Amino acid sequence: MASLERFHRMMDKYHEVANFVLVYIAEAHPTDGWALEGNIDIKIHKNMEERIQAAEKLVDIHPLDCDVLVDMMDDEANIGYAAMPERLYIVKEGVVVYKGGIGPFDYKMPEVEDYLSNYKKMA
């Protein structure tokens, strides 16, 4: 995620009213694909073991206080949630109540924070 620090702050602030989960999908900028300068050396995943290792590398670099799930190689979560390269969702009782824009440019973390703030006031 483009703003893991902000995501951390949001988790800290709203952990009592929300469970946070990060779903690791296909690598957005693999070094053997659409690579960005200064990116971590992660190649296109050829199998589930490589995808899990990439998710573990993310957590090693940016420790997270939430569950980290890894999408299967058929990209079911990525396709089902149109998540590439990153996206924010709020799911309440199994129903999507917020679907953010495609990140990193069109998602708006303040919208998620506003929703959680209002929800916290009502809880």
Image: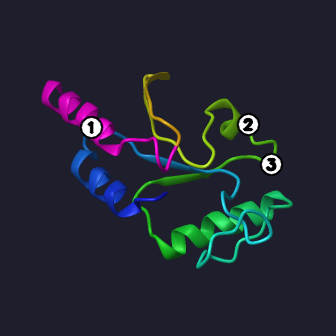
Give the foreground label among 1 and 3.
Answer: 3
The residue at 43%/54% (across/down) is 66
Contact between labelled residues 2 and 1, with CB atoms less than 8 Å apart: no
Q: Nearer the viewer, residue 107 or 98?
A: 107
Q: Nearer the viewer, residue 68 or 116?
A: 116
115 is within the stretch colored magenta: yes
* Neighbours of disc 2 within 10 Å: few (<14), some (14-19), many (20+): few
Q: Kindly identify which residue carries mark 2.
A: 76
4 vs 37, left or right, is: left
Find the magenta span and give its range. Answer: 103-123
Where in the figure is residue 110, as x and y percent of width and height? 28, 42
Where in the figure is residue 118, as x and y percent of width and height? 19, 29
| SS for callout 3 | loop
Q: Earlier in the sequence, mark 1 or mark 3?
A: 1
Where in the figure is residue 122, as x and y percent of width and height? 16, 24
Q: Kindly identify which residue carries mark 1.
A: 17
| SS for callout 2 | helix
Where in the figure is residue 78, as x and y percent of width and height? 67, 40
| SS for callout 1 | loop
Give the foreground label among 1 and 2.
Answer: 2
| Mark 2–mark 3 distance (CA, rounded to whole Å) | 8 Å
Quadrant for residue 56, please give it. bottom right
Name the amino acid type tagged 3: Met
Indicate whether 68 appears above or below 111. below
Q: Earlier in the sequence, mark 1 or mark 2?
A: 1
Q: Kindly identify which residue carries mark 3.
A: 73
* Residue placed furthest toward the left: 121
113 vs 79, left or right, is: left
Name the amino acid type tagged 1: Val
